[in-house]
Amino acid sequence: MLVISAAGWAQDLPVHVDPDARDDVFDPAEIPALRFLTTDDFPPFNYADANGRLVGFHVDLANAICLRLGARCTIQAWPWNQAQDALADNQGDALIAGLDITRDAAERFDFTRIYLQLPARFVAPKDSAQDFRPGAIGGRVGVLAGSPHAELAETSLPQAEIVGFESDFAALEALEAGEIGYYFGDAVRASFWLNENPDCCGFAGEAYFRPDLFGAGFAMAVPSGLDNVRLALNWALIRLQREGRLDELYLRWFPVSFY
């Protein structure tokens, strides 16, 4: 996992797809078109906007991949409980919807390179965020009750009082109200909230990557054995990273970088 500081954006940007990676070999003539499956209820990654149009980070990424490959592109939304079966039934070439890379999923599908990981972050009031030292944390730390983040906080912050909330946003609102001193949890949800509450708080310290707790990250699933599609997607991801296109898409949808 590499993180670069991009001076032009004054943000930390993810580099999950190694731009120096060896190219995957495939025949572009075998990929004249790509059929992506997704869902319409997972903002900001894939969701239906107020006009019913399918939008989101994943939608833009799928279109960018097709453009880079010179392939015709279709993106179809399915209910989450049907999307995997539709892919297994070859009703699509790739599922781009945040499917966890679990053992069960790996038995059904092959996966591309990981293009986005989901770290944990601390959030603190702005007056204390810059001098943040995780080893010195005391007082009340808000977490999503029952989450992997709560588990990690319980074992790693012995001097703190870990306070569980029914949602990440409830914990962040408690932070704004001064009821807790810190929030620790999902960095993606926190970035949405910080974008709406820029004067209150900020990310404190560095991002925490624990694949054993938070998952391996986002990759596209393809039907098992469909190697030409998987290799083509990997090829496109590497080039989009090299060309800066992945950074553009990331900052379009996540203006408060969660890295």
Image (tube, rainbow, N blue to C red):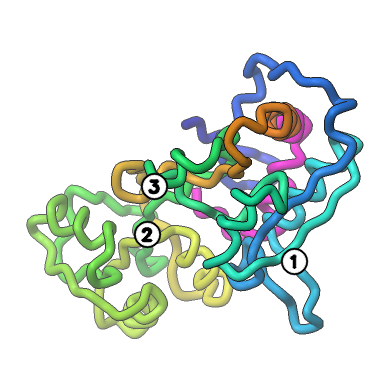
Neighbours of disc 3 within 10 Å: few (<14), some (14-19), many (20+) = some
Q: Earlier in the sequence, mark 1 or mark 2?
A: 1
Give the residues in magenta.
239-259
The residue carrying mark 2 is 129
Identify the element where label 3 is drawn: loop
Neighbours of disc 2 within 10 Å: few (<14), some (14-19), many (20+) = some
The residue at 23%/68% (across/down) is 146
Residue 154 percent coordinates (x, y) = 14, 59
Q: Nearer the viewer, mark 2 or mark 3?
A: 3
The residue carrying mark 1 is 55
Q: Nearer the viewer, residue 78 or 240?
A: 78
Neighbours of disc 1 within 10 Å: few (<14), some (14-19), many (20+) = some
- Check residue 254 for magenta coloring: yes
Tags 3 and 1 touching, CB below 8 Å: no
Q: How far apart are marks 3 and 1 (CA)?
A: 24 Å
Q: Distance between the residues labelled 2 and 3?
A: 26 Å
